[in-house]
Amino acid sequence: MDDRNPIVRIGDSLRELNRVFFHVTRRDCEEFGITPIQFLALRVLKQYPRIGLNELSELMHSGASTVSGVVDRLVQAGFIERERLEKDRRAVELNLSSAGNEMVEQMNDRILDRLSPLLTLSEEDIGHLLRVQGKIIDLLQNGEDK
């Protein structure tokens, strides 16, 4: 029996899940010469093209300063293009370059294949997991207001 505080047990479990996910995806990212957070940025831009840095930060659930550095490195590598808007020269839109688009497609296939053992989970288990995680997120976000 685990006598630890339930909050500690939940936190430990979530950290371990995050560690395993990071480890599984990190190997594939390294083969392509990028980091997992850079891959996340590319994946988000594939799904939401022509967005600004603030929108990208929100969708990645990361701080703007962190995402700014990630974007800078991806621009230098030729995977992201910045485009100034005609209507507001201060604003910049981010978009995948053709190399970035190709990278995301190749990596998505590889990472989805590596994560395919998750497909052995039943729909009921997946639904339960997502429901509980959503409940945890709601509880913690609502608790921030205290």
Image: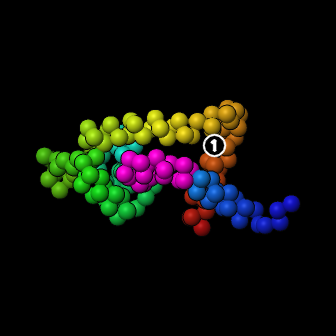
92 vs 140, left or right, is: left
Q: Secondary structure at mark 1?
A: helix
Q: Position of residue 30 (x, y in %)?
A: 42, 52
Is residue 4 shown in magenta? Answer: no
Look at label 1 and name its amino acid: Leu
Please state the extent of the stretch shown in magenta in the rendering.
Answer: 21-37
Label 1 Cα neighbours within 10 Å, binned few <14 / some 14-19 / many ≥20 = few
Q: Nearer the viewer, residue 83 or 99?
A: 99
Residue 7 drawn above or below residue 93: below
Q: Which residue is mark 1?
A: 130
Q: Position of residue 124 (x, y in %)?
A: 71, 34
* Residue at the image point whose x is 71% and y is 65% from the top: 8
Is residue 25 shown in magenta? Answer: yes
Q: Nearer the viewer, residue 98 or 56?
A: 98
130 vs 40, left or right, is: right
Residue 85 drawn above or below residue 73: above
- Residue 92 appearing in the image: yes
Q: Which residue occupies the extreme front position in the image?
A: 31
* Residue at the image point whose x is 32% and y is 38% from the top: 101
* Residue at the image point whose x is 73% and y is 61% from the top: 9
Name the magenta segment's main secondary structure: helix
Quadrant of the rendered structure where residue 45 is?
top left
30 vs 8, left or right, is: left
Q: Position of residue 34 (x, y in %)?
A: 38, 52
Q: Which residue occupies the extreme right position in the image?
A: 1
